[in-house]
Image (cartoon, rainbow, N blue to C red):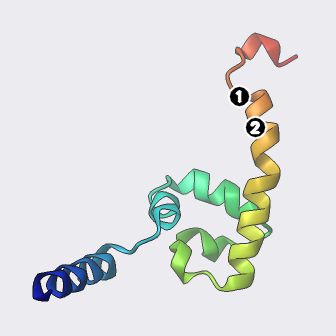
Amino acid sequence: MEQVKVAAESIAQIRGLFGNSRIGSFYDNLDFNMRKTLCFAAGLKQHHVDLKLDELDQLEKVKLHRAINSLEPVIGKLAGHPINDFK
């Protein structure tokens, strides 16, 4: 039983070090221009581009989430086509 407790504590420490949000990690590692694009689509300010996802307040996260969800179907239909199709 003691080993289970130690393992749980170790996992908690690792999550504390690295965070437990895959979405946060993915967002935080986007290149600057992609984060800038997403923040613009969400109506956020320039200073938000430099923030990590967990540094945004709840309203800012909601705006970002809505923007990403509204862009996804459009980008899916436009992505993958050759430049000659853009007429």
Q: Nearer the viewer, residue 40 or 52?
A: 52
Residue drawn at x 72%, y 16% is: 83
**Where is residue 48 shown, x and y percent of the image?**
62, 74
Q: Residues within 10 Å of mark 2 (few under 14, many from 20)?
A: few
Say which amino acid is labelled 2.
Answer: Ile
Residue 57 in picture, x, y percent from top left: 65, 85
Q: Residue furthest front?
A: 1
In the displayed structure image, the side of residue 76 where residue 1 appears, left or right = left
SS of the residue under disc 2? helix
Q: Please indicate whether residue 43 sits to the left or right of residue 28 in the image.
A: right
- Check the image and report above or below for 22 versus 9: above
Residue at 52%, 79% in the rendered image? 54
Q: Alpha carbon of mark 1 to alpha carbon of mark 2: how far?
A: 6 Å
Locate residue 20, reporting x and y percent.
41, 72
**Image disc number at residue 59:** none
Q: Furthest residue to the right?
A: 87
Q: Which mark is residue 75?
A: 2
Q: Is disc 1 placed on a helix, strand or loop?
A: loop
Q: Is residue 22 above or below residue 56?
A: above
Q: Identify residue for label 1.
A: 79
